Amino acid sequence: MKNHSIYPTIQTFISSNNERELVRFCARQHPADLAAAFEEALTQDMHFVMTRLNPGTASKILSHMAPELQSKLLIVLSDEELSAMIQAMYADDRVDLIRNIPDIRKDRLLHMLAKAERQDILKLESYAEGTAGAIMTSDYAALPADITVREALEKLRLEAPDKETIYYAYVINKNRSLIGSVSLRELILARPETRLQDIMHMEPVRAKVEEDQEEVARKILKYDLLAIPVTNGNEVLVGIITHDDVADVLQEEATEDFHRFGAMSHKVPDLSLNIRDAGFFTMLQKRLPWLLVLVFMNIFSGAGIAVFEDTIAAVVSLVFFLPLLIDSGGNAGSQSATLMVRALAVGDVKLSDWLKLLKREIGVAIGIGLCMGLAVSMIGIFRAGPDVAVVVAMTMVLTVLFGSLVGMSLPFLLTRFRLDPATASAPLITSIADIGGVLIYFSIATWYLKDIIAAAGAA
Amino acid sequence: MKNHSIYPTIQTFISSNNERELVRFCARQHPADLAAAFEEALTQDMHFVMTRLNPGTASKILSHMAPELQSKLLIVLSDEELSAMIQAMYADDRVDLIRNIPDIRKDRLLHMLAKAERQDILKLESYAEGTAGAIMTSDYAALPADITVREALEKLRLEAPDKETIYYAYVINKNRSLIGSVSLRELILARPETRLQDIMHMEPVRAKVEEDQEEVARKILKYDLLAIPVTNGNEVLVGIITHDDVADVLQEEATEDFHRFGAMSHKVPDLSLNIRDAGFFTMLQKRLPWLLVLVFMNIFSGAGIAVFEDTIAAVVSLVFFLPLLIDSGGNAGSQSATLMVRALAVGDVKLSDWLKLLKREIGVAIGIGLCMGLAVSMIGIFRAGPDVAVVVAMTMVLTVLFGSLVGMSLPFLLTRFRLDPATASAPLITSIADIGGVLIYFSIATWYLKDIIAAAGAA
């Protein structure tokens, strides 16, 4: 509710040129709310406000902005205004922002920063997207092992303004290797004269700099951490990843799985893009590729049907049940794929579980197929006579079994070949199930109704 | 890697009856790793270890266990052993555990606890599942506004062992109403003589006790909080929710959306159930209901086809293209639904965006339809002549448009009526698109091929 009144209030201050009240008002708002309010603001108003605030406040708002909104603001900010904000940002947010800036301007901006900061940015930026290195920050608190708790607390107090968190401190040796961790809570509870080495946790849980960001996120969840230290190949501490960045990673990964499972192309770089604002061509690029692949796969269903032209011509009522049968196989397959894709993604199921799950799947699919076969055969008798009803019922059991086995196995197969299991999308499973369904249906029909077909051919 | 060696090591200590080394070894492991190691352990071994550890350590391991594993252990623990662990647990974990215990035993256990603890459990347990109240903890740090920073730090230090977090403290007035918040970092940086009222944040972001847990999770993410205070209708502070519980909520909600979108029933209570271990009947209950609903919907496709029996009998080659056309409509619809369901779930898109998105969807769908119509008409000419090719191409454009509009609008419609948008599952959209596709296809064919059909009828 609050958000809705922020921008109108800001506009009043701007139109009355009351800069002092404007700054005071903004200082009382949460940076995340201001960033949200700017979503609907005129660019010149946003520019006016951002350049009146001190760079510290402005940088916090900038960190909370969506990439599209950042880009809008970046265009109107001068290099001086922007570099002041960049300096005030946390190392990880800063790198996210820098990635959004065209190369020429980036070089100019980097040369306006101190050398140490420039090197820090270039180093963080060099890690591949999707790795721990790409989301970590270098603003962590590191302490030597031989100082006392009192000294450690004093050091954290002095460093607090520049660190992303002081609730965890990491203990390093002379080579900057990570040898322990200690929480602020533990420091506060310990006797002031104790040495860190006597209270620190040895061998703290850590992430490797090249580790997949999703793995890192799962580690933080598993161990209920506020932050996780990141080390390079030599066990040297190079950064930390905080809990808030991890929640974002899990959200992104879930969205990516969801989209992929809906047969959306992921070639288009758009994870940070709000679907509401995507343009015509972005949407076309995202959606068309898989649809075309699937259409050409479906030609096999058509070819399958062509083989059985005589059967269809003899018993046209078979066509009534075609959508129902092939859809049921596809639906059962989508269900199985849904369960497996998500379970593999969150780690509930492992590659080695395949055989065990396959056995259960066969049982469950036959159970489902029998229930559904019974249901449709009632309609079959009523609509097309007992012979067609038997064909429809038999087909139902086999198509549901076929669809389910494809749907549950394909995600495993993709995982086995190190591909994303979510590529086994609902539409892909449906199309494979359709081809199988067409062949099963008309094969059974041709065999079971051979007398009727022969009689029609003779007539 | 480490996990794999935990249980074998434990077994060695048990068989050599070396309790002292066993306890020492377990103390060096993370409780989450021990909980994971017990997944493969014999129940008697798990019982042996858990009752040798002090209740504090044992309760931490218990909190990290999955519900099924907890149940296994609960059966073999005596009431005395269990109540000692319950006493040592955090309030929110304790309530999760208590929910897992049959009523008779629960009453017995509650009466073994102190009165204040018993009341706390009963109160937390009374909040409806899925609300802030159900996941909050009562182990928070609350401070009056008129004490100094020095006094506040001393108070936090004393309370630290019993609180889930001391990194945020909440400022309350005499009625226990929430009036401010202050972080431990701010306390450490402030001058010791300052009063809390002078440095606290006024009107901190909060959750209502009956608020949906997903909304609460999004607030914590938006404002990058470690914890959020929970208030009742009178603004009285009743609990806090910490960041780690929120990550679990988001994971659960994403899984729920994923399953629902794959047409899995959510009547079966199974969010905490690992899909790997679900039994035959659980799976049948989860999967069969929607499949049956969809099969009966598909009877409409069959009925649609029956109306056009003469058209099909006259031009049997039309059937070749049936799976391809209805699938394409379903696939395009699944894509649109995927995008909307996820965007509505994470809040990227609002109900009010529908008209704007509908306009774009019409443009994008026609674009996709034209590309795909062009592609299949090539095959159409080759396989069934130019007349059928024209029918197929026109149908493609219209079915893709129909499927896309249904796929994008249905999630909005469900949201409008306060239902879960993910109920617009891929299989449901596919079935609706199929019915539409059948009618569009054979209507166009009957109209465009009327001369051929009339000739066939005359022959």
Image (tube, coloured by chain):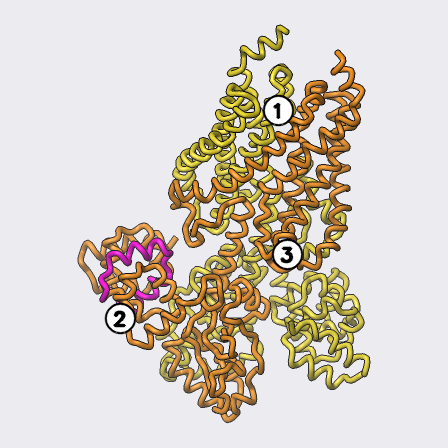
Chain colours: A yellow, B orange
Residue B63 painted magenta: yes
Q: Which residue is mark 3?
A: B416
Which image quarter holds the N terminus of chain A? bottom right
Q: Residues within 10 Å of mark 3 (few under 14, many from 20)?
A: few
Point out the stretch of residues depicted in magenta: B54-80
Label tally: 3
Name the residue type under label 3: Arg
Which type of secondary structure does the marked residue at label 2 adopt?
A: loop
Determine contact: label 2, label 3, CB under 8 Å. no
Name the residue type under label 1: Val
Determine contact: label 2, label 1, CB under 8 Å. no
Which image quarter holds the C terminus of chain A? top right
Give the alpha-carbon distance from disc 2 to disc 1, as whole Å. 68 Å
Q: Residues within 10 Å of mark 2 (few under 14, many from 20)?
A: few
Which mark identifies residue A280?
none
Asked if marks 2 and 1 fall on the same chain, the answer is no
Q: Which residue is mark 1?
A: A319
Which mark identifies residue B111?
2
Give the alpha-carbon distance from disc 1 to disc 3, as whole Å. 37 Å
Q: Residues within 10 Å of mark 1 (few under 14, many from 20)?
A: some
Which type of secondary structure does the marked residue at label 3 adopt?
A: helix
Q: Chain of mark 2?
A: B
Q: Position of residue B29 (x, y in %)?
A: 34, 62
Tell me the chief SS of the magenta region: helix
Is A137 situated left or right of B119 in this image?
A: right
Which type of secondary structure does the marked residue at label 1 adopt?
A: helix
- Front-lying residue, A321 or B396: A321
- Residue A290 in the image: above or below residue A164: above
Q: Residue at x 54, y 52 (%)?
A: B257
